[in-house]
Image (cartoon, grey):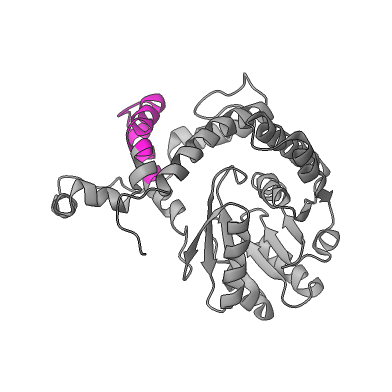
């Protein structure tokens, strides 16, 4: 492993990913073709560091040093120079990623690892042939500098030592890398979220409950229990006989394909995209985007600390 990492893409995920690596002592180049995106990313990184200091997880000197290890650039060639590991987090569009991978293939030395942060795309099918052995998916969750999970997905031709290096890097950074032996769209968590989203749309569009009450129900049941039991162990505690009975009970039918739900499509048409625009299904306009993220992240830190404590004391037997 070298000491230089390039993060390509400075939008929603890039600043948090860059923060993660910089905190571990890596020199990080954060790329975007847009100067305004880079300026916003720098503000988000500064806010991230301030929060770590306020929460007692860093002193000011360490935060300033980490912040100083992140360099901002609008040149891909400049960003990847001397990098041993590339974290790609550009927009989720196949043509954009294909063009970027072709450029990387032309300019990178051999043996540089290319890790995509894609949330669902099969980037292995578009990666230039000679790069496939050094390609993985390393999928973070927002906010990337706080949530521990990184889904590390192996491609058909990914070398085992590349998987090992990607996993070791994120363990070193205090993350929880989860290994997937082969690609499936959405990996683990986004497949779970996709199933939930389908039900959310069905319940809201058909007026069964309000967004506020739906979130209240989930926050006071599934989420706190899930920190301890997850999904699979929950089945053990409910009883596998109950799960089997549920699977054979045909009175419950999953929500149908949502099509184009009016509540959501109308909001997007209005430009109400959620927290990043100040309004979505809820109103966030009382805070700036940076203030909103910092408030969210401060509370998430407490949740993550509790979840980590639970993971250290599993209820089931572990291997000796």
Q: Is residue 199 magenta?
A: yes
Foreground of the two, 287 or 258: 287
Q: Is residue 137 above or below residue 37?
A: below
Tell me if I can see residue 272 in this picture. Answer: no
Q: Is residue 56 left or right of residue 239?
A: right
Res 58 quadrant in image = top right
The residue most toward the front is 320
Image quarter (top left, top right, bottom left or bottom right) of the N terminus: bottom right
What secondary structure predominates along the stretch shown in magenta?
helix
The picture places residue 290, in percent across and down from the top left corner, at: 68, 30
Q: Is residue 21 above or below residue 299?
A: below
Foreground of the two, 1 or 72: 1
The picture places residue 176, in percent across and down from the top left corner, at: 52, 54
Q: Which residues are magenta?
A: 196-224
Q: Residue at x 63, y 34 (%)?
A: 276
Q: Residue at x 46, y 59 (%)?
A: 187
Task: Give the tally of numbered discs.
Answer: 0
The picture places residue 300, in percent across and down from the top left corner, at: 53, 35
Foreground of the two, 138 or 160: 160
Image quarter (top left, top right, bottom left or bottom right) of the C terminus: bottom left
Q: Is residue 159 above or below residue 18?
A: below
The picture places residue 22, in percent across and down from the top left corner, at: 73, 50
Q: Is residue 126 left or right of residue 190?
A: right
Tell me if I can see residue 219 in this picture. Answer: yes
Res 135 quadrant in image = bottom right
Q: Is residue 85 left or right of residue 286?
A: right
Q: Is residue 248 magenta?
A: no
Foreground of the two, 11 or 250: 11
């Amino acid at each position: 492993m070298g000491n230089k990492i390039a993060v390509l893409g400075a939008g929603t995920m890039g600043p948090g990913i860059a923060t993660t690596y910089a905190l571990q002592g890596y020199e990080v180049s954060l790329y975007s073709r847009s100067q305004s995106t880079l300026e916003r990313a720098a503000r988000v990184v500064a806010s991230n560091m301030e929060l770590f200091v306020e929460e007692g997880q860093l002193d000011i000197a360490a935060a300033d040093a980490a912040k100083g290890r992140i360099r901002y650039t609008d040149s891909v060639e400049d960003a990847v120079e001397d990098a041993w590991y590339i974290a790609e987090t550009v927009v989720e569009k196949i043509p954009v990623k294909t063009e970027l991978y072709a450029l990387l293939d032309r300019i990178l030395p051999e043996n540089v690892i290319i890790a995509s942060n894609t949330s669902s795309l099969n980037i292995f099918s578009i990666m230039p042939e000679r790069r496939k052995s050094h390609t993985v998916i390393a999928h973070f969750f927002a906010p990337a500098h706080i949530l521990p999970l990184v889904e590390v997905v192996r491609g058909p031709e990914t070398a085992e030592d590349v998987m090992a290096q990607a996993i070791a890097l994120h363990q070193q950074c205090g993350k929880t890398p989860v290994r997937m032996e082969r690609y499936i769209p959405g990996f683990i968590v986004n497949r779970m979220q996709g199933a939930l989203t389908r039900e959310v749309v069905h319940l809201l569009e058909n007026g069964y409950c309000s967004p506020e009450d739906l979130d209240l129900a989930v926050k006071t049941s599934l989420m706190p229990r899930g920190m301890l039991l997850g999904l699979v162990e929950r089945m053990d505690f409910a009883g596998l006989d109950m799960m089997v009975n549920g699977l054979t009970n045909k009175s419950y039918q999953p929500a149908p394909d949502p099509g184009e739900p009016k509540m959501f499509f109308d909001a997007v048409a209005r430009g109400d995209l959620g927290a990043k625009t100040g309004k979505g299904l809820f109103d966030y306009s009382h805070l700036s985007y940076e203030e909103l993220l910092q408030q969210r992240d401060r509370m998430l830190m407490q949740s993550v600390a509790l979840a980590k404590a639970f993971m250290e004391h599993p209820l089931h037997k572990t291997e000796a």
